[in-house]
Amino acid sequence: MAMKSFVWLAAAACLAPVGPAWSQGFVLPDGPGRELVAESCGGCHAINRLGAGYTPEGWRTIERMMRNMQVPIPNDKWPTVTNYLIKAFPEKPKPAAVVIAGPVQATIKQWPVATPGSRPHDPLATRDGMIWYSGQVAGVLGRLDPKTGKVKEFRLKTPHTGPHGLVEDTAGNIWFTGNNAGLIGKLDPKTGVVTEYPMPDPAARDTHSLTFDQGGILWFTIQQANRIGRLDPKTGEVKLLTPPTSGSRPYGIQVNAKGIPFVVEFGANKVASIDPQTLAIREYPLPNAAARPRRLAIAGDDVVWYTDFARGFLGRLDPATGQVAEWQSPGGPKSEPYGIVFTKGALWYSESGTKPNTVVRFDPTSEKFQTWVIPGGGEIVRNMDVTRDGNPVLANSLVNQVGLVDVK
């Protein structure tokens, strides 16, 4: 694929192919800039995604993202495009954040990342106390020192790699999924050298989330290609697996204490596990057919917790029995629970659909919630990680920030 075409594909999270959208009945309102939007935007997402709407500042951030991705719009035309989008697609009403008091004291600290419009996607708390982030549309990995606020960014090897998920190995290397380029990458922070591991199947694009097992094997998901991958860092060998359910869209992935990877299938109402020896995949159907689990966390007892993004629920799956329990998230059915971790004896996750976004704590013993509003609105925490002292870390995509929940 030519680089220009590749850039258009990668940039399509905002402005995307016109043809299929018209057939779905989506219409761009009249106004200055309409033709530029219709003619200049192309990629992998339907143009009807514009209908979600953003605040004016949100659209300006989208503009910066698209400039980073080199969308082919002349510089002098961008103000016209952005003003059109602000007027044509204002932010739609969202459920109000629900603030619930509780026994835990916590504050949320936030820092801006270095490149405007970089869309920090996943955060990573490393053993040396740093907080990393993937600058998805800027093609960088960033490292924040929370003690000083200093940020250093590392440019990746392939243009428009689209870094997404992050994980640290025992040597301190930072591994990432190249979401746009269809690869797994490794960054040596000491030298800045990046090593890339391409997928053996060119159809296996959209490398997504990743995690190490206790033996040093890297497991990862490939969402749109409906695959799960296994990479041996010692040999570089990559094996690709296909879940039993077509279109299951493997998304978040974690490994339990026994070394068994678990995956949530965002395109189905299922959680899956992989036998690390036979590579057999077992699926666990969730009771509600409309459930769409997006991220997961595994507690010390190997129980799987997941965020049901579509229905606004927190869920619990016991793989030993197959039993599932659910709790409506405080923000309600449209709260869009997303990034989640288990730390300090509780589940911590984000509500990305409320205004403002929240951080939610759920105590599995008392089954009670506590919530905090994310300063500045939050604007979509897609994933979370945990520092060595047990504090959740965040990456806030639309406001270009990295955050830390300081639990007292």
Image (spheres, grey):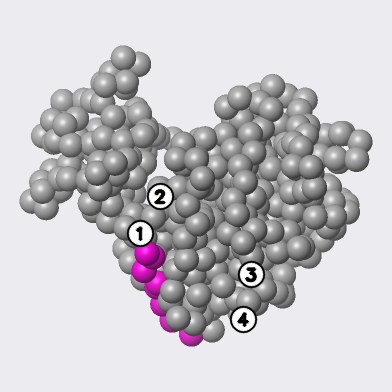
Residue at mark 2 to residue at mark 3: CA–CA distance? 22 Å
The residue carrying pointer 1 sits among few (fewer than 14), some (14 to 19) or many (20 or more) residues within 10 Å by Cα, namely: few
Q: Quadrant of residue 174?
A: bottom right
Identify the amino acid type marked 3.
Asp
Quadrant where the C terminus sits is bottom right
The disc label shown at residue 181, or none: 2
The residue carrying pointer 2 sits among few (fewer than 14), some (14 to 19) or many (20 or more) residues within 10 Å by Cα, namely: many
Does residue 253 appear anywhere in the picture?
yes
Question: Percent from the top left, x then y, of residue 74?
Answer: 10, 48
> In this picture, which residue range is highlighted in magenta?
148-158
N-term mark: 1 or 2: 1
Label 4 or label 1, whichever lies nearer to me, is 1
Instruction: Give left or right: position of 242 versus 300.
Output: left
- Label 2 near label 1: C-beta < 8 Å? yes
Asked if residue 130 is positioned above or below residue 22 in the image, the reply reads: below
Write down the residue under mark 4: 128
Residue at mark 3 to residue at mark 4: CA–CA distance? 12 Å
Instruction: Give left or right: position of 264 versus 224.
Output: right
